[in-house]
């Protein structure tokens, strides 16, 4: 009887783009482990901020393993760092199962295993290395994997980089989204297309006395936010013109394990670990609202199952903090002997600000709360968990000195900073 149950067909076949990145990796792990009857295809280009180990080490104790493997090794995959700890909770075997398909326009790595993965991966999971801007690849995946749901996380997302390399952001965030939408339209079998956007599309929130609802006008102020807004307009157009069943999400700043250290929270944590001063753009009074990753994963689970087609959902928390307060909280939790705030202040270095840096983003998540979502992890609890993870696994990302610099190289070149 158990054998018969294990051979039952999958009830959902989900393509997750950007599934080796920060938020995407947590969502993939959650879906694979929570819903064994869902088949999850993880598509990621393995850019600098993605890491397959984010996902595959979490499957070490999963019950539904894939039964075959080989000893071949894919030298093209971003395996992050070979010196991950050997504490027993993460396996360092670098086995790959799969085939490589060669097309006239691109090369695709389609595998059930990659460097840094455990010996066996769950039967309801497949990893594909590839770029969302390749229409041929997307068509191939949708057809051969019989995809009926798309969760679109893949994006260039670091605002600082967008000031110095904005065309790449348009290529990935707008063209990549357009390719997915068009291939989904042609495929004709997509039941749910969830597009992951950002609260930054709303623009400057300082002048607003109330939190912004989903129908607020989009007024992006930086190249990254502009590309995400452009992608949203395409999603809306495909929903209206072709009846593609789309949903859009816009979340606050998310933090937690697996996040590449260029983002504020992991950057500050890694600067403290290395005893570097914490670099803050401007005077540090700009505020952002923070959500721990598990609360965001819960939001996507809820939207996947109960979200209404055609709707937009804000995913916002209750932790609005200035950049300086974030730095002070991290210093306090990581330096128990340095309790005095005057002493902590000396460990902060204020540097040149962005050309334009929104003072705050504030969004209203009433619509999402109405279908059952709530924030469960406090800022203090989430920050402690995040610090613990980076102290133990931060070396996973390899050399991150460039990420810990006050400004990215392209940013410095564009604005002629030292």
Image (cartoon, rainbow, N blue to C red):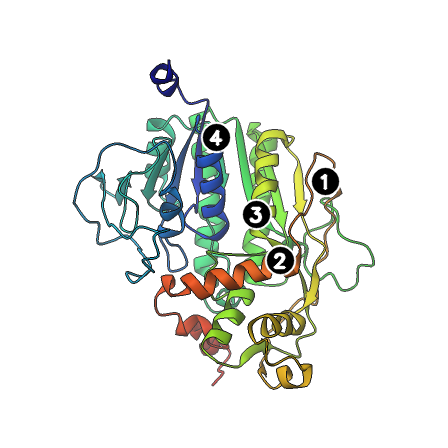
Give the image location of residue 26, x and y in percent: 48, 46
Would you place residue 335 above or below residue 157 in this image?
below
Residue 145 in which image quadrant? top left
| Real-space Cα separation, disc 3 to disc 4, in angstroms | 16 Å
Q: Which residue is mark 4?
A: 35
Between circles 3 and 2, the one closer to the viewer is 2
The secondary structure type at the circle numbered 2 is: helix
Between circles 3 and 1, the one closer to the viewer is 3
Mark 4 or mark 1, earlier in chain = 4
Q: With 375 as the anchor, is 279 left or right in this view?
A: left
Mark 3 or mark 1, earlier in chain = 3
* Mark 3 Cα shell of 10 Å, populated few (<14), some (14-19), many (≥20): many
* Mark 1 Cα shell of 10 Å, populated few (<14), some (14-19), many (≥20): some
Residue occupying image coordinates x 55% and y 34%: 238
| Real-space Cα separation, disc 4 to disc 1, in angstroms | 23 Å
Give the image location of residue 396, x and y in percent: 37, 61
Q: With 120 as the anchor, is 382 left or right in this view?
A: right
Q: Which residue is mark 1?
A: 369
Q: Nearer the viewer, residue 136 or 327?
A: 327
Label for residue 381?
2
Question: Which residue sits furthest left?
Answer: 71
Q: Nearer the viewer, residue 235 or 30?
A: 30
Q: Which residue is mark 3?
A: 294
């Amino acid at each position: 009887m158990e054998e018969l149950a294990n051979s039952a067909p999958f009830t959902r076949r989900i393509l997750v783009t950007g599934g080796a990145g920060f938020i995407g990796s947590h969502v993939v792990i959650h879906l694979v482990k929570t819903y064994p009857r869902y088949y999850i295809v993880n598509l990621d280009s393995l850019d600098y901020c993605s890491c397959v180990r984010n996902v595959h080490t979490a499957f070490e104790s999963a019950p539904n393993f894939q039964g075959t493997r080989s000893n071949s090794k894919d030298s093209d995959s971003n395996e992050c760092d070979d010196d991950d700890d050997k504490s027993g909770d993460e396996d360092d075997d670098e086995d790959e199962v799969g085939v490589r398909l060669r097309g006239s326009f691109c090369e695709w790595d389609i595998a059930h295993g990659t460097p840094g993965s455990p010996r066996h991966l769950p039967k309801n999971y497949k990893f594909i290395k590839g770029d969302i801007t390749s229409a041929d690849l997307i068509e191939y995946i949708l057809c051969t994997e019989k995809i009926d749901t798309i969760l679109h996380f893949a994006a260039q997302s670091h605002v600082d980089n967008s000031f110095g390399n904005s065309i790449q952001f348009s290529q990935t965030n707008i063209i990549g989204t357009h390719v997915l939408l068009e291939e989904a339209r042609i495929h004709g079998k997509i039941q749910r297309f969830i597009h992951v956007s950002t609260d930054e599309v709303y623009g400057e929130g300082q002048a607003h006395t109330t939190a912004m609802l989903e129908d607020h006008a989009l007024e992006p102020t930086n190249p990254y936010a502009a590309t995400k807004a452009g992608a949203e307009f395409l999603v809306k157009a495909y929903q209206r013109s072709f009846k593609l069943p789309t949903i859009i999400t816009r979340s606050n700043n998310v933090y937690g394990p697996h996040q590449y250290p260029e983002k504020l929270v992991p950057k500050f944590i890694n600067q403290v670990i290395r005893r570097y001063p914490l670099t803050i753009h401007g005077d540090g009074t700009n505020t952002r609202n923070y959500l721990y990753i598990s609360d965001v994963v819960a939001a996507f689970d809820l939207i996947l199952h109960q979200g209404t087609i055609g709707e937009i959902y804000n995913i916002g928390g209750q932790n609005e903090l200035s950049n300086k307060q974030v730095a002070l909280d991290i210093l306090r939790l990581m330096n128990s002997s340095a309790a005095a705030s005057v002493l902590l202040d000396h460990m902060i270095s204020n540097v040149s600000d962005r050309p334009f840096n929104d003072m705050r983003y504030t969004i209203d998540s009433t619509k999402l709360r109405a279908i059952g979502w709530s924030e469960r992890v406090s800022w203090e609890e989430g920050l402690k968990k995040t610090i613990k993870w980076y102290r133990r696994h931060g070396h996973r990302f390899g050399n991150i000195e460039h990420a810990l610099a006050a400004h990215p190289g392209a940013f410095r070149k564009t604005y002629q900073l030292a």
